[in-house]
Image: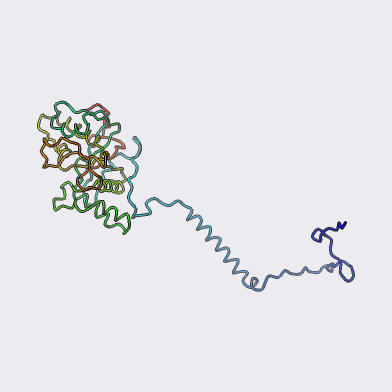
């Protein structure tokens, strides 16, 4: 059996084929120089420099593009409402009173403490607005702030102008469709906006949050009702005058019907009534599809630190009125 190992296992130097002697370089002889291909040898130095530069560029690019994308990079995207800071942390809700370039302080907010709110037996003028919605007893677990007046034509026009300035695209067209055409009336700028869909009102609240850094939203029926009961209790403590004696309460109940954030079968509930509706006809809870441009609205925010805007004292958690 041939046990000769293959040539790649044979580490001995090969003998000269003619004489059998092993070739050895003469003593002191220089080793033959390993030559590079002519083209590589010619451009050896530029290739080394170019390779070093390419490596640096790749390293810098990796460091730059491996960072997470910064928020808000897409200016044409739908503005999202930022989260409200947790209770007891972050800035006071006063930071959410945005100072607009025209010098107006918007919106003007009414703080509503957490607590239990009940419809008193002698509040006969308030009952038609609350009883059909089941709001005779309301429990508010977290304090909030509600806009004292409805969103005005001036404020809504500011929002519409902002949408018009957006880059053309699907988002801009969707927001314009939600805005519709029924809201733009030839009336004073301080008039409550009406003829707005629930979708358009919600878009406005999100835009306002994007502009101010505060989590605005439409009020729920319970929040709206608690604000009415709070104002009615304050009115009764001052005098026994009629319901129209309190301007804030008047603007909450009358003016225009307003969208709420409370869903119903096929849409969302409306609260309050139009000025032209007589009190005896205020007797039912109205549910409307979100796409219909039929109402006005106001906004609310959760109070990060619900201090009284005049005294700075913490809002009480009490059963009232």
Q: Residue at x 16, y 36 (%)?
A: 249
Q: Nearer the viewer, residue 95 or 110?
A: 110
Toward which corner of the image does residue 299 lie, by quadrant?
top left
Left or right: where does residue 72 sit relative to residue 12? left
Placement of the N terminus among the 4 image quadrants = bottom right
Residue 199 position, x and y percent, is 27, 47
Q: In the displayed orientation, state which residue is furthest to the front.
A: 265
How many marks on residues? Answer: 0
Left or right: where does residue 45 sit relative to residue 290? right
Residue 302 position, x and y percent, is 29, 38
Toward which corner of the image does residue 81 lie, by quadrant?
top left
Q: Nearer the viewer, residue 145 or 295?
A: 295
Q: Nearer the viewer, residue 150 or 67?
A: 150
Residue 7 position, x and y percent, is 81, 61
Residue 232 position, x and y percent, is 16, 32
Q: Residue at x 34, y 44 (%)?
A: 82
307 relative to 18, above or below: above
Q: Residue at x 12, y 42 (%)?
A: 275
Left or right: where does residue 191 sit relative to residue 74? left
Placement of the C terminus among the 4 image quadrants = top left
Q: Nearer the viewer, residue 264 or 31?
A: 264
Looking at the picture, the colour scheme in use is rainbow
Toward which corner of the image does residue 167 lie, by quadrant?
bottom left
């Amino acid at each position: 059996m041939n046990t000769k190992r293959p040539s790649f296992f044979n580490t001995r130097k090969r003998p000269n084929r003619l004489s059998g002697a092993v070739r050895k370089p003469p003593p002191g002889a220089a080793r033959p120089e390993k030559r590079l291909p002519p083209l590589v040898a010619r451009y050896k130095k530029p290739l080394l420099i170019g390779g070093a530069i390419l490596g640096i560029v790749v390293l810098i690019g990796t460091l730059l593009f491996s960072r997470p994308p910064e928020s808000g990079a897409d200016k044409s995207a739908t503005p999202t409402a930022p989260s409200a800071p947790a209770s007891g942390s972050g800035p006071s809700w006063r930071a959410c009173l945005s100072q607009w370039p025209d010098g107006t302080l918007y919106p003007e907010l009414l703080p509503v403490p957490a607590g239990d709110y009940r419809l008193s037996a002698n509040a006969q003028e308030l009952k038609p607005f609350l009883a059909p919605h089941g709001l005779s007893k309301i429990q508010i677990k977290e304090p909030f702030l509600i806009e004292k007046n409805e969103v005005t034509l001036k404020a809504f026009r500011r929002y519409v102008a902002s949408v018009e300035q957006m880059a053309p695209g699907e988002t801009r067209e969707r927001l314009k469709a939600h805005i519709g055409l029924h809201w733009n009336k030839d009336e004073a700028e301080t008039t409550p906006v009406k003829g707005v869909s629930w979708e358009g009102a919600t878009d406005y609240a999100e835009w306002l949050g994007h502009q101010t850094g505060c989590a605005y939203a439409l009020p729920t029926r319970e929040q709206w009702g608690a604000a009415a009961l709070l104002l009615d209790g304050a009115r009764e403590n001052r005098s026994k005058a009629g319901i129209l004696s309190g301007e804030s309460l008047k603007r909450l109940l009358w003016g225009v019907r307003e969208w709420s954030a409370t869903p119903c079968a096929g849409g969302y509930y409306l609260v309050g009534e139009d000025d032209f509706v007589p009190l005896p006809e205020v007797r039912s809870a109205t549910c409307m599809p979100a796409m219909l441009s039929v109402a006005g609205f106001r906004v609310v925010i959760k109070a990060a630190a619900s201090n009284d805007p005049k005294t700075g004292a913490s809002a009480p958690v009490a059963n009232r009125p």
